[in-house]
Image: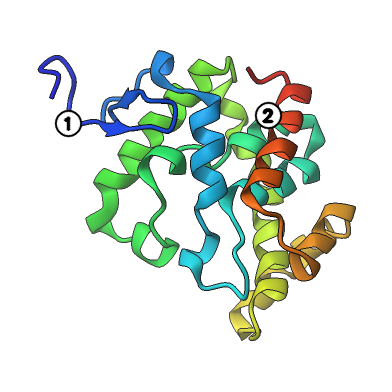
Amino acid sequence: MDKQRYGDWIHTYTGKRFYPLDPRPEDIDLEDIIWALSHQCRFSGHTRRHYSVLEHSMHVAELCPQFGAFGLLHDASEAYLLDIPSPLKRLPEFAFYRESEKRLMSAIAQRFGLNEQYWEKVHDADKAMLAYEYEHLFDVQLPEWKKWDKFKAMCPYPAAKHLGEEHWKPEIQREFFRTAAKDAGLR
C-alpha cells in the first residue's frame, strides 16, 4: 500500500495500480473502463442474457448524441468500484459508497476534460434505457415501472433492437465502444 494514497489498490486490465478510494485523473485509463464494463452485467446479472454495462452505456450515448461522451462514461465508475443495486445504494448505510462514486466520477470528468455539470444531461436517457431494458431483458412487468412510460418514447432507436434479439460478445462491444469513444473525442 502506498502511504501517500488513501485505501488500497486494485490491479487493472492495463496493469495499473488503481486506488478506487483515492482516484486521480492520471490513473484512469479508457481501456480499463472498456474492458471492465464489457464484463459486468447490468441488474446484478439477473437478465435473460448477459447484458453489460458497456452495452448499456453505448445505448444511452445513442439516445443523447449531443452529450455522447457523457452517455458513454455515465457509469464509468463501475469499472473501478463495481455497482451496488439501487435498492441498496439508496440506503443511508451506503453513503460512503455514494461519496466514493462521486469522487471517482469527478476524477473521470477531469481525466477526459468533461464539465461535471453535464452528467445530469444524460439522466433522462439513462432512465429511458432502464425502462426499455426492463421490458426487454426480463420476463415480468412490475406495476411500479409504469412511471417510466414518459421515457419509453425516447427508445425507438435502431440499437435498441439488440436488447431482445442478439448478444453482443464482449469483444464486439469493446470495438463498437472504442469507435463511439473516438467519435466523441475520448482518448
| Label 1 SS | loop
Q: Position of residue 74 (x, y in %)?
A: 57, 39
Q: Is residue 178 left or right of residue 110?
A: right
Q: Quadrant of the C terminus?
A: top right
Q: Sequence order check: which comes first, mark 1 or mark 2?
A: 1
Task: Residue under label 2, please give it.
Answer: 69
Q: Position of residue 118 (x, y in %)?
A: 62, 29
Q: Position of residue 114 (x, y in %)?
A: 59, 20
| Label 2 SS | helix
Residue 20 in sight here = no
Q: Residue furthest left?
A: 3
> Residue 7 got which mark?
1
Q: At label 2, which amino acid type do we have?
A: Ala
User: Residue at the location (39% across, 18% down)?
Assistant: 27
**Rendered image quadrant of residue 34:** top right
Q: At label 1, which amino acid type do we have?
A: Gly
